[in-house]
Image: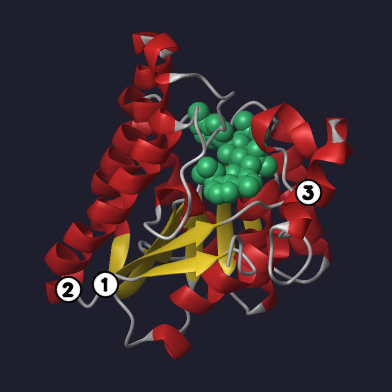
C-alpha cells in the first residue's frame, strides 16, 4: 500500500486531502498540533471507512523536533504498513494572519510566519527525504495570495511573501529531486471554508457571501475541493506534472 504523510491533517485542507487520499487506497500519516481531537477524528474516520491512518503530533514551527518526528514516522510505517519508506509528502500545515499594515509588522509575526510556512516545510522535507521512495511526489499547499494574477490585499505582506517563497521552493525541489523521479508541485487555494484564522468563517459567516460573489463559480471553496486537487497531483494521472502550481480558487476575481 502506498503511504502519504500529510501535515496539518486535523482540520481543513489537510483533513480533506487525507480523506481523498484514503478513498483512493493510500495509507495516511497525518499530523496535528494544537487540535489532537481533530487529528484523531481524521484518523478514526479513515479507519471506519476501511482505510489505514495514523495521527502524530508535529509542530512545523519547531525544526528541532523533526528528527524525533522522523523516528515516529519510521515506527508507524513499520508497524502499520510493514514499510521502511513512504510515497507522498503534503506540506500543508499553516496558519492565517490578521491583516497588519507593513509599518506595523513585528519581527515576531514575521519570524512565526517564516518558521511555519518556509523553514518548517523546508527542513521537514529535508529530514523526511531519506524515507521518501524514488518515484514519489510532494505537494506544497501555498496560497492564491502569492500568485501574480491575484490582486494583493493590504495587510497580508508577510503571509503572502512566505506563500510565494513556497512556490519558488517547489520549483527548485522539483529540479533537485527529479533525478530520483520525485515530482514536486504546489496547490494555491483561494478562499476555502476551514478553521484558518481562528475559525473565522464559523465565527463570522457574514464574511462568506461577499467572497462568494467575487468567485466565478459562485461559492467559496470547501476542503475537499482542494483535497481532490492534492490527491490528483500525487496520483499517476499527474505523472507528467512537476514544478507546477495549480490555482484552485473557483475563479476568484476572474
Ligand atoms: N483556508 C483558506 O482560505 C486557505 C487559502 C490558501 C491557503 N491556505 C493554506 O492551507 C493550509 C491549511 O490551512 P487550512 O485552511 O486547512 O486551515 P486549518 O483548518 O486551520 O488547518 C490548518 C492545519 O495546520 C495545522 N497547523 C497549524 N499550525 C501548525 C504548526 N505550527 N505545526 C503543525 N501544524 C500546524 C493545524 O493543526 P492544529 O489545528 O492541530 O494546530 C491544522 O491541521 C495552510 O498552509 C494555509 O495557509 C488556506
The alpha-carbon separation of the residues under discs 3 and 1 comes to: 40 Å
Residue 99 % position (x, y): 56, 24
Q: Earlier in the sequence, mark 3 or mark 2?
A: 2
Q: In this view, does 31 lie to the left or right of 120?
A: right
Where the C terminus falls, by quadrant? bottom right
Tell me: is circle 1 under 8 Å from ligand 1. no
Q: Along the line of sight, which residue is nearer the eye, 20 or 3? A: 20
Q: Is residue 135 left or right of residue 86?
A: left
Of marks 3 and 2, the one in the foreground: 3
Residue 249 % position (x, y): 60, 63
The alpha-carbon separation of the residues under discs 2 and 1 comes to: 5 Å
Q: Which of marks 3 and 1 is nearer the N terminus?
A: 1
Q: Is residue 50 left or right of residue 190?
A: right
User: Which residue is tagged 1?
Assistant: 182
Mark 1 is surrounded, within 10 Å at the Cα level, by few (under 14), some (14 to 19) or many (20 or more) other residues, namely: many
Mark 2 is surrounded, within 10 Å at the Cα level, by few (under 14), some (14 to 19) or many (20 or more) other residues, namely: some
Q: Which residue is drawn at 24% across and 52% down?
A: 169
- The quadrant where residue 140 appears: bottom left
- The quadrant where residue 157 appears: top left
Labels 2 and 1 touching (C-beta < 8 A): yes
Q: In the rendered image, is residue 52 in sight? A: no
Q: Residue at x 45, y 74 (%)?
A: 234
User: Which residue is tagged 2?
Assistant: 178
Tell me: is circle 3 under 8 Å from ligand 1. no
Q: In this view, does 101 lie above or below 69?
A: above
Residue 93 % position (x, y): 52, 42
Q: Which residue is drawn at 48% across and 50% down?
A: 151
The alpha-carbon separation of the residues under discs 3 and 2 comes to: 42 Å
Q: In the rendered image, is residue 164 in sight? A: yes
User: Which residue is tagged 3?
Assistant: 210
Q: Along the line of sight, which residue is nearer the eye, 238 or 108? A: 108
Amino acid at each position: 500500500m502506498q503511504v502519504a504523510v500529510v501535515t496539518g491533517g486535523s482540520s481543513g485542507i489537510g483533513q480533506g486531502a487525507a480523506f481523498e487520499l484514503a478513498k483512493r487506497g493510500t495509507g495516511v500519516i497525518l499530523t496535528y498540533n494544537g487540535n489532537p481531537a481533530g487529528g484523531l477524528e481524521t484518523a478514526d474516520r479513515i479507519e471506519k471507512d476501511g482505510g489505514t491512518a495514523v495521527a502524530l503530533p508535529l509542530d512545523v514551527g519547531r525544526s528541532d523536533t523533526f528528527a524525533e518526528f522522523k523516528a515516529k514516522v519510521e515506527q508507524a510505517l513499520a508497524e502499520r504498513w510493514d514499510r521502511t519508506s513512504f510515497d507522498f509528502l503534503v506540506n500543508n500545515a499553516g496558519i492565517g494572519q490578521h491583516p497588519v499594515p507593513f509599518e506595523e509588522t513585528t519581527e515576531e509575526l514575521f519570524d512565526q510566519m517564516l518558521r511555519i510556512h518556509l523553514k518548517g516545510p523546508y527542513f521537514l522535507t529535508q529530514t523526511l527525504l531519506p524515507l521518501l521512495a524514488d518515484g514519489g511526489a510532494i505537494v506544497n499547499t501555498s496560497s492564491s495570495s502569492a500568485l501574480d494574477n491575484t490582486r494583493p490585499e493590504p495587510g497580508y505582506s508577510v503571509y503572502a511573501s512566505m506563500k510565494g517563497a513556497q512556490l519558488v521552493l517547489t520549483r527548485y525541489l522539483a529540479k533537485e529531486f527529479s533525478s530520483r523521479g520525485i515530482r514536486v508541485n504546489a496547490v494555491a487555494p483561494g478562499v476555502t471554508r476551514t478553521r484558518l484564522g481562528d475559525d473565522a468563517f464559523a465565527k463570522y459567516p457574514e464574511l462568506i457571501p461577499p467572497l462568494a460573489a467575487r468567485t466565478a463559480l459562485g461559492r467559496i471553496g470547501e476542503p475537499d475541493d482542494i483535497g481532490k486537487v492534492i490527491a490528483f497531483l500525487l496520483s499517476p494521472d499527474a505523472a507528467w506534472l512537476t514544478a507546477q502550481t495549480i490555482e484552485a480558487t473557483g475563479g476568484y476575481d476572474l
